[in-house]
Image (cartoon, grey):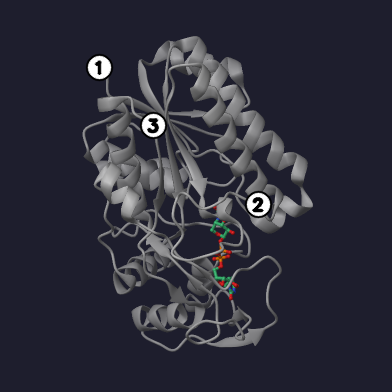
Amino acid sequence: MGNKILLTGGAGYIGSHTYVALIEAGFEVVILDNFSNSNPSVLIRLGQITGQNQVICYEGSVLDKALLAQIFTEHDISAVIHFAALKAVGESVEQPLAYFSTNVTGLLCLLEEMKSAGITRLVFSSSATVYGEPEEVPIAETAPLQFTSPYGFTKVASEQILTQAAAADPWAFGVLRYFNPARAHPSGLIGEDPSDIPNNLMPYIAKVASGALPHLNVFGNDYDTRDGTGERDYIHVCDLARGHVLSVQKLLSTDEGHVVNLGTGQAYSVLEMNTAYGKAAGRDLPYVIAPRRAGDVPTCLADVRKAKEVLGFETHFGLDDMCQSSWNWIETQARS
Ligand code: WQD
């Protein structure tokens, strides 16, 4: 069996880190990316990290079925890892049709071309957002699925499409429900690179630390949590990337599908994250208390037992490692 993997959205934040992890695990990798939320310059840095002279990347969309067919003709792909999607909750409320098109129609286009090419293994990038407002934490994979935004709907709908498709044809799907991806590759060469003002906490704190933003707005300090601010399960992006390698290896070796949480099982509050990042940056980072953000839940925390049982997955990076690697990325960007 071959070991060439297609990464849709492979130039993005999680895709690029997964590219590195796959190369280091001995796979060959092809990227498809339309650079709508990534920068082509990452391809050069991927070559630097992996020591490759050439990173194979096709520029285009998963909606382009002819391009997908061309890739599957030109490369003997054994499995696909599907990152290419829109992922901002707030933006999905403003542009639902764009989210349905890219995230749901895009998945269908990919599945149709995979089927035509006889490729049956897919790792799907899902999210803890499919749990909506959890009834209990830690959240197990058996928790009911619900959505609180068009983005969340696209992830629930996509998981349902995979479930129904697998009932009819011999697909093997690895569904990975990410909790809160954060941080950056220790080299500082790749990381989260939002083009505008970040929605997510960690890139926002990083911009405050770099001086690009004046202070953090803490969205509410009256939640029923340790210090009143929102608690989340932040997983280092390199741990997350390794989870994808384990998932695709599982599919290639057993053709057994799986649905697992990828988190740490540890939650940190907004203020705890801000303090930890300030330690890495060497100064206290300013913040102000702001009103709650619509749709936020008090605590989101993964039950990590199934990922350990099914994939042998465990996280390696702790909070301080995560803040330091993110700060390294910021300093590298500042130098460049
Ligand atoms: C984390 C905490 C905020 C920004 C989102 C998506 C989810 C997934 C990950 C794609 C919360 C607080 C944030 C800020 C703040 N994306 N916060 N000030 O909302 O848990 O998850 O990203 O799959 O689908 O919903 O992450 O980083 O936006 O927020 O106080 O400027 O930080 O209230 O408690 P979230 P987040």
Q: Nearer the viewer, mark 1 or mark 3?
A: 3
| Upstream in sequence: badge 2 or badge 3 | 2
Q: Nearer the viewer, mark 2 or mark 1?
A: 2
Three-letter code, disc 3: Gly
Quadrant of the drawing holding the N terminus: top left
- Viewer-side residue, 106 vs 140: 140
| Upstream in sequence: badge 2 or badge 1 | 1
Give the structural element (helix, strand or loop) at label 2.
loop
Q: Quadrant of residue 81?
A: top left
Mark 2 nearby-residue class (10 Å; few <14, some 14–19, many ≥20): some
Q: Quadrant of residue 246?
A: top left
Asked whether residue 45 is in view, the answer is: no
For the residues labelled 2 and 1, the Cα–Cα distance comes to 38 Å
Q: Residue at x 63, y 26 (%)?
A: 63
Mark 3 nearby-residue class (10 Å; few <14, some 14–19, many ≥20): some
Three-letter code, disc 2: Phe
| Quadrant hosting ligand 1 | bottom right
Q: Residue at x 34, y 72 (%)?
A: 319
Give the structural element (helix, strand or loop) at label 1.
loop
In the rendering, at what x and y percent does residue 90 appear? 70, 58
- Viewer-side residue, 107 vs 164: 164
Q: Is residue 197 above or below residue 111?
A: below
Three-letter code, disc 1: Met
In the rendering, at what x and y percent does residue 88 appear? 63, 54
Residue under label 2: 147
Residue 1: mark: 1
Residue under label 3: 257
Quadrant of the drawing holding the C terminus: bottom left
- Across the whole image, how many numbered discs are drawn on residues? 3
Q: Is residue 195 above or below residue 35?
A: below
In the rendering, at what x and y percent does residue 244 appear? 35, 42
For the residues labelled 2 and 3, the Cα–Cα distance comes to 23 Å
